[in-house]
Amino acid sequence: MPSASSNPSLRSVRLERTFGDGATRRVALSGVSFDLYPGRLALLMGPSGSGKSTLLAILSGLLNPDAGQVLAWEDGAYVDVWALPQAEREAFRLRQVGFIFQGYNLFPAFTAAQQLEIVLRWGQNASASDARRRSHAVLEGLGLGGQMNKKPAQLSGGEKQRVAIGRALVKGSKFIFADEPTSALDWENGKLVLELLRREAHDHGATIFVVSHDSRMLPYTDIAYHLEDGHLSEMSRSSLGELP
Ligand SMILES: Nc1ncnc2c1ncn2[C@@H]1O[C@H](COP(=O)(O)OP(=O)(O)O)[C@@H](O)[C@H]1O
Ligand SMILES: [Mg+2]
């Protein structure tokens, strides 16, 4: 973990978000302020419907808050993500944000290597050979050296999620957001996903934010939060438990 003196990489300032109105009005976030740090894996827990996905979407530039700010550290200054014009916000996301979802979201017709290569070809204008070399290196690091040329239908759930992790990591994003990344996996594969994300945070300084309701993840995280009734609280260090 980095020293406690690192600047926060992502600051949430009094975020508010409500859905619907009248009888269907639901307050998802009610004044949520907290900081995320580089080199740490943060976990967000909370009951179903408590607003976890809403918060992840707001932090990652996908869903606008009703009020409040998301400040992301980039090149020595904070960028106010929701004050940017849409095109600039999308460019920021493309440059700095990687996503991992429960359902993998892989292209069925592409091999594991191609899922990563297209990110580099389209997102960074990398040459075909450079994209191939970097994609292979990332997949090797995720233990998928033997699966490079397989399509999603030929991969297990755990392997598919590792490819999705590779796709999020390959462009060198500073921020990785994962919404229930292990809920379709057995615990052995779920644990591996967390260990790989943790390694990315600790070895490369990425800021990782994982949403889950699985308390078995707690020992693998650096910090954990609980969201309920629109309010966020930090869970105590002792409630995270020890790594087995
Ligand atoms: N697009 C939407 N339209 C209306 N209500 C929504 C929408 N997205 C989420 N909600 C509501 O906001 C609350 C929080 O949802 P969500 O963030 O998905 O919770 P979680 O991820 O914790 O299960 C829920 O009551 C949900 O029904
Ligand atoms: Mg959700």
Image: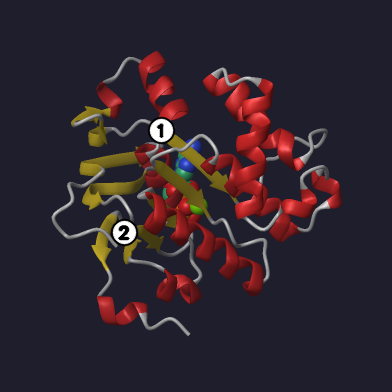
> x, y percentage for residue 195?
51, 65
Name the residue at the right extreme: 154
Q: Quadrant of the N terminus?
A: bottom left
What residue is at 41 percent from the left and 76 percent from the top?
Answer: 219
Callout 1: SS: helix
Q: Quick one: label 1, few (<14), some, or many (20+) residues within 10 Å?
A: some
Give the image's coloring scheme. Answer: secondary structure
Reading the image, the residue beneath label 1 is 96
Residues at circles 1 and 2 in contact by the CB criterion of under 8 Å: no
Viewer-nearest residue: 226 or 189: 189
What residue is at 36 percent from the left and 59 percent from the top?
Answer: 42
Q: Look at the image and tell me whether residue 91 can be seen.
A: yes
Q: Amino acid at mark 2?
A: Asp
| 1 or 2: tag closer to the N-terminus | 1
Toward which corner of the image does residue 186 lie, by quadrant? Answer: bottom right
> x, y percentage for residue 232?
27, 58
Reading the image, the residue beneath label 2 is 229
Q: Amino acid at mark 1?
A: Gln
> x, y percentage for residue 151?
82, 42
